[in-house]
Amino acid sequence: IKFIETNYPEFLDHLSSAKSPQQMLGSVIKGVWATKIAKVDPKDVVCVAIMPCSAKKFERAREEMEVDGIRDVDLVLTTRELGKLFKQNNIDLTKLPPSDFDQPLGVSSGAGVIFGATGGVMEAALRTAYEVVTGREVPFEHLNIAPVRGMEGITEAAIRIQSPLPAYSWLENVELKVAVVHTISNIRTFMDNMREMKAKNQPIPWHFVEF
């Protein structure tokens, strides 16, 4: 968000209003788990996010990332910082006994499982949109929309809507075009390309882009 605000402000109106997975989970922990499951005051809950990117520290501190004075996420540690803590406290993960993953909110959907992966937000959105519009799950051969997920710099994919529900008949045979862009250098290249398209009044071909 900060990158677009600083470098491509003319595209701000096109940004999703949804929070990142980090901030969404913080909101759920404070707003749902604390109040409805654990029955504790959200002010007494400290939410710590473990993230690979140091920019998540800045995101946590943005002024809009709180409700009624309660921060969605209180602290962010990078994976490297977590590794140092393990080392300082002589914690050897290979010697810890295995345990089940906590599921305080129940079992997540397939889309939920992939949500935090690179390209996962896009794939989750595609799956959900397809099911809402057609009343069917994405066909088996498309359950993993491979051209979208992955670590390549810029990947594109498309999925065609066929036999939608009557309320969405106008989407018959529409091809949803999406892109996933990984790393700041590739985002800059992609945004420069879109800026040039806009300046030339050329149609931007993608319906949804995940950075």
Image (tube, rainbow, N blue to C red):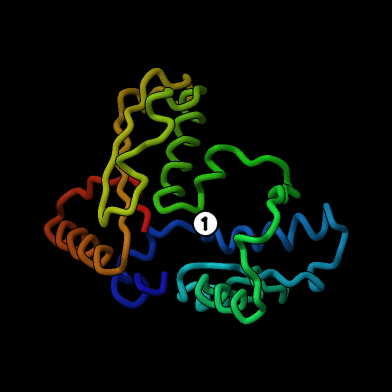
Question: In the displayed structure, would residue 58 be above or below residue 176?
Answer: below
In the visual, does 68 lie left or right of 85?
right
Q: Position of residue 151 (x, y in %)?
A: 33, 54
Residue located 48% across and 42% down the image? 124
Q: Secondary structure at mark 1?
A: loop
Q: 94 or 146: which is nearer to us?
A: 94
Q: 46 or 158: which is nearer to us?
A: 46
Residue located 57% across and 68% down the image? 50
Extreme residue toward the right, this view: 39
Q: Position of residue 159 (x, y in %)?
A: 33, 32
Residue position for label 1: 18
Question: In the displayed structure, would residue 58 be above or below residue 204?
Answer: below
Q: Pointer 1: residues within 10 angstroms few (<14), some, or many (20+)?
A: few
Question: If the image is split into quadrants, where does the N terminus sit?
Answer: bottom left
Residue located 33% across and 44% down the image? 148
In the visual, does 160 lie left or right of 93?
left
